[in-house]
Image (spheres, coloured by chain):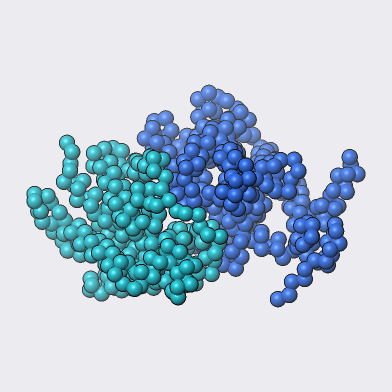
Chain colours: A blue, B cyan
Amino acid sequence: MVNRLLRDLQGDVLAIPGRFMALVFVLLLLFLPLATKDPYILRILIFANIYVIFAVSWDLISGYTGQISFGHALFFGVAAYVAAMLNLHLGLEPWATIPIGGLAAAIAGLVVCLPALRLRGPYLSLVTLALPFILLGVVFYFSDFTGGELGVSGIARISGSRTVEYYISLTMMLVSVLIMWKLTDAKSHIVRTGIILHAIREDEIAARASGINTIRYKLMAFAVGGFFAGLAGGFYAHFMRIAGPSTLDLFLSFQAIIWAVFGGICTIYGAVVGVYILYPVVWEFLLTDFLGVSSEVRLLTFASVVVLVLLFMPEGIAVWVRDKIERTCPRCKLANAAFRHTCRACSAPLYTRRR
Amino acid sequence: MFDWERILVNGLVQGGIYALLAIGFSLIFGVARMINLAHTSFYMLAAYGVYYFGQRLGLPLIVSIVLSLLITTLIGICTYKLFIERVREHQVTVLLITLALALVFQEGVVLGFGGHYLGTPSFVSGYREIVGVKVLHQHLVILGTVLAALLGMWALLSKTRLGIAIRASAQDTEVANLMGIDVPRILLITMGIATALAAVAGIVVAPTLAIEPRMWTHPLVMIMAIVVLGGLGSVKGSFIAAFVIAFVETIVVYQFPEGAYLKGSIALLVMVIILLVRPEGLFGISLEEERL
């Protein structure tokens, strides 16, 4: 067992630069609290973990089904409000309210999916855009119950210690990303959903002609994506101790798209990279702390960075880097480090790209 | 009491503005298959242009209008040439770049003018009564301009060679290319026309609204709803849907003043319901599968 794990580690993780970097990154995150317990840094990383779940779930819904959703904040907001209400009025503990919030968001996902089955492409994008707005109107209308502009406050904290909260968010992020990655992994031998979702994205009619019930898989993508976005929303509500209209904001939906597309759409890890580069590194540490950019110029610089990077790496930064450091074997389609001349499995010569 | 006078006037004005914005948006979507999230930021820029040239520099009204229109259109064309054209094949990237550009414009305006509300006086003051209904002169100006712009658009699209080329590219880019139409040039021109329409809307509406950096978001959501409701790529559909949405909004505002913040929600709800019944919009032809 241990031998096999070690062999897999050596052969399938260490041999491929991208996976090696992912491993190092996860280890760094796991051991970070040993190096610093600075509540400010931990707070930002907790937000980053929440946003990773959020952005990856957007990628699952939109990247893989090809239905660009403009209203991803719907799931976040629904779960945040549900978790907050359950905690405040029924006194449920966070470990119960967050998953229930997730389930509520999954149901919201199924409801959203009803138009998604009838509408396609841009039509769907724009209907999803409308839904958080409609809900926002409802929230403001029942402001006695929902707190209106101020939101629901006074929710229980997840834990008294920032470090514990950090580890809970990290575990939740790693598990969620792992599940979503496996669900969409086209090469997986365990679950078939990955290859089916890829097929639907490439050509829905062909997928249907091959006997795939595309409706079922779209429903699944919306429910699962909604569930995980809901987990993020519930955690956010308990971490911020407030669920307000900002959780349904248009800008939050747009941010999910920015993060996922910046990293590389339809890759799962792209969304992770996008969030970690844009949110903590560029937004908080680089712009705010290091360069001391004043808050007026911050959004401007941020947007300019996004525009410039995408101009030169239109498929996203993670995909661009991956193409530089990895090469696919032309014969067996395994990923190889870019410095190799022959494939590590079948020893077929790899292309040497000349420019 | 049903306050039909104000509803009629304001609905028509709002509908006209939405129609101008939505037709440009629909046009650029039809030809380039891109959702231009920066579309309404040109409307915002034009409103700021009128304010800047008219109030800050004190130029005569007509000069500031023309300057604002020209500069906004130029910005639109440059934006397309510099940023959008290079990534046009990647649809989602286009989406994101236009969104980021809208944010850049918004923050640029905040830097230049500050985040507070600005105003500019009406082009013509006063009001007159038309069959017993009080109408502000500014509203007449808006309606007249909208009508002129829409008629101009219709004439351009149906009578000129350029209009035929634009429609041909919208129907099938590749075949249009094979017929000798310079598609990249058509795209650039379409972008210019769409931006100019947005700029006209921004200019005429500037005196009636508070000019502020975030004034682009509400119309953006609304015109996206309108374009979908009318059927993507259908100019006639956008036109009618613009008035449907605008009247829903206006009726909500004037009949239920306590629920005025619900106006967007209700208009969008109407859109969702109509779409559930007719998935291709009011006048859309269901788009055939795009050629790969």
Q: Residue B133 in the image: state x and y as whole percent.
A: 12, 50
Q: Nearer the viewer, residue A102 or A332?
A: A332
Q: Nearer the viewer, residue B112 or A338?
A: A338
User: Toward which corner of the image does residue B209 lie, by quadrant?
Assistant: bottom left
Q: Residue at x 70, y 76 (%)?
A: A355
- Quadrant where the image shows the N terminus of chain A: top right
- Residue B250 in the image: above or below residue B42: above
- Residue A268 in the image: above or below residue B98: above
Q: Residue B146 in the image: state x and y as whole percent.
A: 25, 61
Q: Residue A212 in the image: state x and y as whole percent.
A: 62, 42
The residue lying furthest to the right in this view is A3
Q: Residue at x 34, y 44 (%)?
A: B267
Q: Residue at x 36, y 69 (%)?
A: B164
Question: From the viewer's perspective, is B190 left or right of A301?
Answer: left
Q: Can residue A238 be seen from the camera position used here? A: no
Q: Can residue A25 be seen from the camera position used here? A: yes
- Please tell me how many numbered marks the rendered image carries: 0
Q: Nearer the viewer, residue B221 or B233?
A: B233
Q: Residue A328 in the image: state x and y as whole percent.
A: 75, 61
